[in-house]
Amino acid sequence: MLLINKAEVQRMIDQFQGQELYVHLEMTTGAYAAHLDSSKHPAATFISNARIRYSQGSISGDGPYRVGLKMDHGWVYSEGLTHYEDGDMQRLIMAGHDSQGKLVVALQLSREPF
């Protein structure tokens, strides 16, 4: 994955606007490893292959970045994004990694299920 190129990610967000898409949104604070350190608060969120269509989408911030997708009846919002996968025109994969390189958040959009 590459460090986010804000202009390129915005172009990809615009490319998917108004289309039926599958979304994958995931966030973890290290819940999978909390059994090794009881001082960590285990928290995680996961939604996969939900169908969305957004009328407006944008990326903002100076890094880590935020992405918001406005739908008819709500929003999809993700913060802490640092990387994206370049060169795939059928899907947009973004992730946020902490200072140790561990995955903290992921937001993916695709015309096909993940």
Image (tube, rainbow, N blue to C red):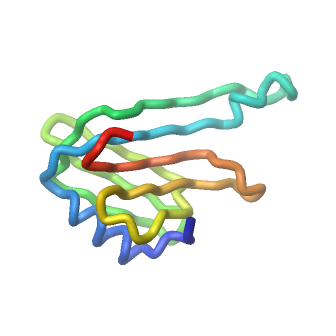
In the image, 47 versus 29, the foreground residue is: 47
In the image, 67 versus 92, the foreground residue is: 92
Question: Image point 22% across, 48% down: which residue?
Answer: 70
Question: Image point 44% across, 57% down: which residue?
Answer: 66
Number of numbered markers: 0
Rendered position, 61 above or below 18 = below
Question: Image point 69% across, 26% down: which residue?
Answer: 42
Task: Judge from the rendering whether residue 14 lies leftward or rightward of residue 24; answer left or right.
Answer: left
The quadrant where residue 24 appears:
top left
Q: Position of residue 96 (x, y in %)?
A: 57, 54
Q: Position of residue 113 (x, y in %)?
A: 32, 39
Q: Position of residue 62 (x, y in %)?
A: 50, 71
Quadrant for the N terminus, please: bottom right
The quadrant where residue 37 appears:
top right
Question: Image point 25% across, 48% down: which residue?
Answer: 111
Task: Judge from the rendering whether residue 114 lies leftward or rightward of residue 101; answer left or right.
Answer: left
In the image, 58 versus 89, the foreground residue is: 89
Q: Position of residue 114 (x, y in %)?
A: 39, 40
Rendered position, 90 above or below 10 = above
